[in-house]
Image (cartoon, rainbow, N blue to C red):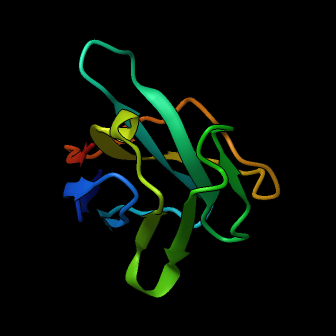
């Protein structure tokens, strides 16, 4: 089993920044991908960004690629999401997820099977 624990959420004013972290433990995989998703009230969960564990290939949702940066620290089994220029519409619960993934040069946008509990991000106007 894989355990994922998110941290770093909170309340921030529009234009501000937050850095989310996801610590993975248990049975972690070299051939895997780590992703961030979010779910706003009344909306479906949506893809934010993802990174492959060993190569570090990245992918972003179009609306976030200029403001968000995903990175990983292999030694600490941690994936981070730096969020800048936050907007009220970024308010959501942010989830970390992981999945097995052999094709480390490309990044999966779906099919994640292990999820964290989520961390709330609230952006005030």
- Location of residue 23 by image quarter: bottom left
Query: In the shown orientation, is residue 42 left or right of residue 75?
Result: left
Look at the picture and state if 121 lies above or below 8: above
Residue 124, position as x, y percentages in the image: 23, 45
Residue at the image point whose x is 19% and y is 43% from the top: 117
* Residue that lies at the very extreme toward the front in this rendered image: 125
Residue 22, position as x, y percentages in the image: 33, 63
Residue at the image point whose x is 66% and y is 55% from the top: 66
Residue 122, position as x, y percentages in the image: 22, 45
* Residue that lies at the very extreme toward the bottom in this rendered image: 75
Residue at the image point whose x is 79% and y is 50% from the top: 106
- Location of residue 30 by image quarter: bottom right
Quadrant of the snapshot with the C terminus: top left
Look at the picture and state if 18 lies above or below 48: below
Query: In the shown orientation, is residue 38 left or right of residue 121?
Result: right
Image label count? 0
Residue 38, position as x, y percentages in the image: 38, 36
Closest to the observer: 119 or 63? 63
Look at the picture and state if 29 lies above or below 113: below
* Residue that lies at the very extreme toward the right in this rendered image: 105
Closest to the observer: 15 or 95? 15
Closest to the observer: 35 or 62? 62
Query: In the shown orientation, is residue 55 left or right of residue 13?
Result: right
């Amino acid at each position: 089993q894989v355990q994922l624990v998110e941290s770093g959420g909170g309340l921030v004013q529009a234009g501000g920044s937050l850095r989310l972290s996801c610590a993975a433990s248990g049975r972690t995989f070299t051939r895997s991908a780590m992703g961030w998703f979010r779910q706003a009230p009344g909306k479906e969960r949506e893809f934010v960004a993802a990174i492959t564990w060993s190569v570090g290939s990245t992918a972003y949702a179009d609306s976030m690629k200029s403001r968000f940066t995903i990175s990983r620290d292999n030694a600490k089994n941690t994936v981070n999401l730096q969020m800048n220029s936050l907007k009220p519409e970024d308010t959501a619960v942010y989830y970390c997820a992981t999945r097995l993934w052999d094709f480390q040069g490309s990044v999966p946008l779906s099919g994640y099977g292990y999820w964290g509990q989520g961390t709330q991000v609230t952006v005030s106007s």
